[in-house]
Amino acid sequence: MIIGKVTGVVVATRKNRHLEGNRLLIVQPLNKELKPEGSSLMAVDHAYAGFGEMVLVIDEGNSARQVFDNPEIPVRTFIVGVIDRIDLE
């Protein structure tokens, strides 16, 4: 799982038929200090996340197929939750 921040929205006039009705967002992964780390990625929004929100992302294709209940959906990365708060020692 990846903690990230939503930094953008992807607008597509044409999508794979299995993705119709799903929002595509750009997510910047964050490190333990909640600072940007690595390259941004595109994720299907399954949690109704908004711009600037911290999110929990899963980057694994089989999980995506199970969550979307569709063995043919071409998804590997998707947002499963919006993070309200993180407490670290």
Image: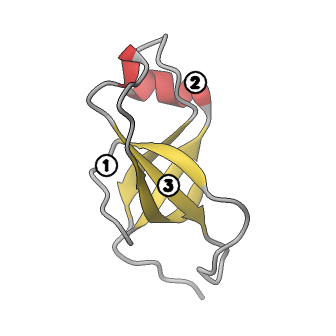
> Label 3 to label 2, Cα distance in Å?
21 Å
Considering every residue shown, the one lying at the far right of the view is 38
Considering every residue shown, the one lying at the far bottom of the view is 89
The residue under label 3 is which amino acid type? Ile
Label 3, secondary structure: give it: strand
Total count of labels = 3
Disc sitting over residue 62 in the figure: 2
Indicate which disc, 3 or 2, sits on the residue closer to the N terminus: 3
Q: Residues within 10 Å of mark 3 (few under 14, many from 20)?
A: some
**In the figure, is residue 59 to the left or right of 65?**
right
Disc sitting over residue 5 in the figure: none
Considering every residue shown, the one lying at the far top of the view is 72
Residue 35 lies, in percent from the top left, at 63, 81
Label 1, secondary structure: give it: loop
Q: Nearer the viewer, mark 3 or mark 1?
A: 3
The residue under label 1 is which amino acid type? Ala
Indicate which disc, 2 or 1, sits on the residue closer to the N terminus: 1
Kindly identify the residue that appears in the image at 60 percent across and 88 percent down. 89
Kindly identify the residue that appears in the image at 61 percent across and 71 percent down. 30
**In the figure, is residue 49 to the left or right of 44?**
left
Q: Which residue is mark 1?
A: 47
Residue 54 lies, in percent from the top left, at 43, 69
> Label 2 to label 1, Cα distance in Å?
18 Å
Is residue 69 shown to the viewer in this render?
Answer: no
**In the figure, is residue 35 to the left or right of 81?**
right
Q: Residues within 10 Å of mark 1 (few under 14, many from 20)?
A: some
Considering every residue shown, the one lying at the far front of the view is 13
**Picture layout, residue 79 above or below residue 74:** below
Is residue 29 shown to the viewer in this render?
Answer: yes
